[in-house]
Image: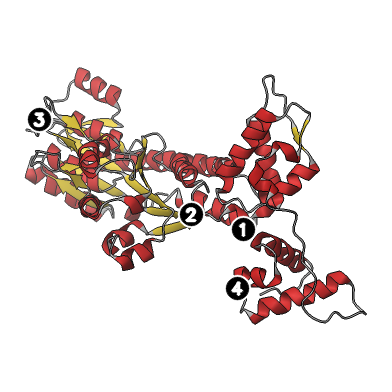
Amino acid sequence: MTDTSVISILLVDDEVINLQNVGHFLDHQGFLVTTAVSGSEAINLMQHSQFDLVITDLKMGDVDGVQVMKMAKELHPEIEVIIVTGYATVNSAVNAMAEGAFYYLPKPIKLKELHVLVLRATEKMMLRREISRLKQRIKAQHGTTQFIGQNPEILKLKDSIAHFAQLDCNILITGETGTGKELVARTIYELSPRSEKRFLPINCGAMTEDLMINELFGHEKDAYTDAGAMRSGLLESATGGVVLFDEIGEMPLTMQVKLLRVLQEKKIIRVGGTKEIPIDVRLLAATNRDLKEEVERGTFRQDLYYRLNVVNIHIPPLRERMDDVHLLVNYFLAKFSLPGGRTKNMSKEALRKLENYDFPGNARELENIIERSLALCDDKEIQPHHLPADLHSHPDLAVPNLQMAADPRKSLEENQQEYILSVLKSVDGNKTQAAKIIGIDRVSLWRKLKKYKQKGIDVT
């Protein structure tokens, strides 16, 4: 049985008495009712709120019921619409149903009949939404598989993407260059209810401020020299979709003010215009900078930071998940396979070189290394000499001679373990500092600590 207390209805009629009578009846039945006395008011309400059902009069002064229905379907495809009119004809009823109306109800309205129709329409709407949710859940289970890796941090990242993709909130994606911030944003978009609309990536570091204003907001005719015609901006064209502001930390302060207003008002004004234009976009932002530090320096607005950082998704650098390197190598080898689907292998020696490299360029650098190595390799396997010279300056690292008295009753490995853990404890768990004292790189230290942890040893 439908729980009417959670059903939101938009009731539209330019005859105030009819609006009040039907509104009072539906309210008494337990529905959440919002009223509009014109088609234009109804459209404005739908652009800022979501309804489960629209009941609209057909003949109205400014915008008729069919136009209201078309806008309702455009904004929220799962919504149902009941059209009411005192000018009932077979043709108008057929036309309304063909346009997507759930039912065509003649006046005077029989309230009991309306109640039955409302229940049927909302049940259909809820069923459609449930099917959509199930599809999104299945899509989420498969969609995040494009993130290669089984490291615990990557598994958490996949869960976060699948969860927050369903919520229509702003997300700040952080991570070093090459970690895959745009890939995260695209996956969020593809798994979201907005996936049928546009995904619009905007590189904040690639445009001047004047160009960005014109591109984002558009302009009116004759707004400036050579503006011979009105042009809609990117934000207006992306209504209903998802916008990614990549490298948001590079956006000028004056532009940040304008973006903050868009987030607050959900409206834009074209260059040279005065009319406010409603927009409906979900905003994602990505940066490799520490925006908290930028706020403290005064180069990034604090209020905009809080608006963007409703949810933060951080992508770990590759050096912190080196156990995924071999999986990524196999993925990139397959990606750049030869014609006919033939792939080459990575020799153990070459793989060891990769596993002992710290990848300052992250997964993107690894991808480039694999593509380059395949181009240079005429053998069946990629060998160390096919790899870039940078990797050869990172020899396979092991823990050097112990800097403390070794216990002859224990193995070398046991003595190394005690030494590493004692150094780590002496610097309060600072792995970077501990690695410097021991004389190895941070990746090698991380790998050894992981091995100890798998044995059940406390490495905190």
Tag 1 or tag 4, which sits nearer the N-term?
Answer: 1
The image quarter containing residue 451 is bottom right
Q: Position of residue 142 (x, y in %)?
A: 58, 40
How far, Cα to Cα, is label 2 from label 4? 20 Å
Mark 1 surroundings: few (<14), some (14-19) or many (≥20) residues within 10 A:
some
Disc number lying in front (2 or 4): 4
How far, Cα to Cα, is label 4 from label 1? 14 Å
Instruction: Determine if residue 155 is in view.
Output: no
| Amino acid type for the residue under numbered disc 1 | Glu
| Amino acid type for the residue under numbered disc 2 | Gly
Q: Which mark is residue 430?
A: 4
SS class of the residue under badge 1? helix
Mark 2 surroundings: few (<14), some (14-19) or many (≥20) residues within 10 A:
some
Q: Position of residue 460 (x, y in %)?
A: 66, 75
| Amino acid type for the residue under numbered disc 3 | Thr
Q: Reply above or below: 163 against 334.
A: below
Disc number lying in front (3 or 1): 3
Q: Reply above or below: 441 against 53.
A: below
How far, Cα to Cα, is label 3 from label 4? 59 Å
Say if mark 2 contacts mark 4, CB within 8 Å. Answer: no
Q: Which residue is mark 1?
A: 320
Q: Position of residue 177 (x, y in %)?
A: 49, 49
Q: Which mark is residue 175?
A: 2
Q: Which mark is residue 73?
A: none
Tag 1 or tag 3, which sits nearer the N-term?
Answer: 3
Q: Position of residue 256 (x, y in %)?
A: 25, 53
How far, Cα to Cα, is label 2 from label 1? 12 Å
SS class of the residue under badge 3? loop
Q: Which mark is residue 225?
A: 3
